[in-house]
Image (cartoon, grey):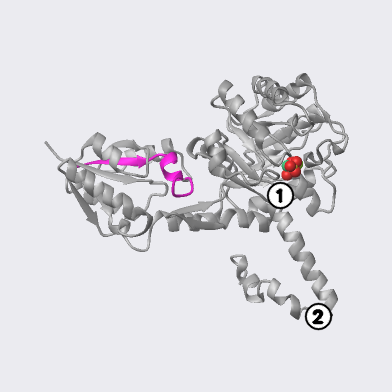
Amino acid sequence: MSKTVYIGMTADIMHPGLINIIEEGTKHGEVMVGLLTDKAIAEYKRLPYLSFEQRKMVVENIKGVTKVVAQEEWDYAPNLLKYKPDVMLHGDDWVKGAQEKYRNLAYKTMKEIGGEVIEVAYTTGINSTDLVESTKTIGTTPQVRLKALRRLINSKPIVRILESHSGLTGLIAETTVVEKGGKRVEFDGMWSSSLTDSTSKGKPDIEAVHITSRLHSLTDMLECTTKPIIYDGDTGGKIEHFAFTVRTLERNGISAVIIEDKVGLKKNSLFGTSVPQTQDTIEGFSDKIKSGKRAQITEDFMIIARIESLILGKTVTHALERAMAYIKAGADGIMIHSKEKSGEDIFEFVNKFRALDTTTPIVVVPSTYNHITEEEFEKLGVNIVIYANHMLRSSYPAMQNVAKSILENGRSLEAADACMSIKEILELIPGTK
Ligand code: SPV
Ligand code: MG
C-alpha cells in the first residue's frame, strides 16, 4: 500500500512554491492536503481572499493531490494524530519565529505515530504573505470585502474595529500591526462613525451630513484599503429612505449598517439624558429593520440593531425585550450601547442576552468603559468591539497644539518635533515618488 504524505497549507493564492511542495510530496506517496480553515488562519494572519470552499475546490484539482481535509487549527498535531500519515512534508521556512513551536509539535507527533517529517527547501522569492501584500496594492472587490465581516465573525473569537473618517485613517486601520506573543495583532476593519465623520466636516452629529457626503469619506477609505467597513447609519432615517441606504452601502461593498432605535432629532448618544432624545417604538423600529432586510440584495450584508435603552436611563430588562424583538424582525446582530463608566450594565446585558441567545453577534462600543479588555469581552460573549472615535480624538489635539506653537513663536521650528519629517510624509503613501 502506498504511503500517505500530509501537507498543511492555506492555498489562498496558488503559486509555484506550493506546486513544488506538492510535487515533492508525490515522490513519497499519496498527498493529503490539510487545508487550513478560516478559523485556523485567523489565529495568526489576515483572512485569505478565497473562502475555504473555494480554496478546497482549487486544491482538489491540482495534479498529485489525492485528498483534501480541513485543518481546523494552526497546530498540525491534531490532524497528524487523526490521519496518522507516514510522512509529513513542510517547507523549511518554519524553523524560526512563530512557527517554530508548531514545528516542534509536528516532529514530536510524527515520532509518536511512527512517521517521519521531511523538510523541503522553501522556494525563495515567493510566498503567500508577500503575494497578499502585493494584492493589497491592487485592491479588492466590493463582494469580497462585503463578505469579509461575516467571515471574520465566524472565524475570530473577537473582531476588532477602528474608527475611520478619511483615506488616511483608513490606511492606519489597514496597515497598523504590532507583534504580541509571536502573533500579528491588527485591526480587522473600520467603523465609519457619524460623530467623527460629521466632526471632520465641521458639522454636529445630528444627521446633518447627508449620505451623499458620507459616501465621499467612504469612497476615500474604499479606494486605499481592503478591510471590511461597518457604517454608522444613525437612526436609518425614514423607513422609505433606509431601503435606499442599504442598497447604496451594499453596492459599495460595505459589510454592515448599524442603526439606532431613536426618532426625531438625533443627538450623540454620549450626551445621555442631558439632551432630549426619543426612543422609537418597538414596532416602528422593527418595521425599519424589516424594510432594510427586504431591500438587501446579497445574503451577506448585515443590519445590526443598536439599542439605546441604557443610554436613555432605562433598564437592562427594557433593552433585552428590544433585542429579542429586533432579532425577530430580522436584525443580524445587536449593538448594545452605554455611557456608564463601569461597564456593569453591559456585562449584565450580555450575560442575560447570551442565556437567551447563544449565536446572534453582539457589538459593543467601549468609549466610556474603556478599562475593559478585548479578552474580557471575548469571555463575556461579545463578537465585535468598536473603538469608535479614537483617530479623530487623538489627531485634533495634536494638530491644535502645533497650530498654537506656530502662533506663539512666529515660526514653525518649535513645532517640528511634533511633526513627522518631510521625508516621512513624502514616503507615506505608496506611489508618491
Ligand atoms: C459614533 O461613533 O458616531 C457613534 C457611537 O454612533 S457614539 O458616538 O458613542 O454614539
Ligand atoms: Mg453615531
Residue pictured at 72% horizontal, 36% vertical = 338
Of labels 1 and 2, earlier in sequence is: 1
Residue pictured at 50% horizontal, 39% vertical = 157
> Residue 51: x and y, percent?
46, 39
> Residue 136: x and y, percent?
53, 55
> Which residue matches tag 1?
389
Q: In which quadrant is the C terminus drawn?
A: bottom right
Mark number displayed over residue 344 = none
In which of the image's four quarters is ligand 2 placed? top right
Left or right: residue 118 compared with residue 335: left
Residue pictured at 71% horizontal, 49% vertical = 389
Residue pictured at 62% horizontal, 69% vertical = 432
Magenta includes 423? Answer: no
Left or right: residue 396 compared with residue 256: right
> Residue 350: x and y, percent?
61, 30
Extent of the magenta region: 30-47
Q: Nearer the viewer, residue 405 or 7?
A: 405
Q: In this rendering, is residue 355 above or below 387?
A: above
> Which residue matches tag 2?
411
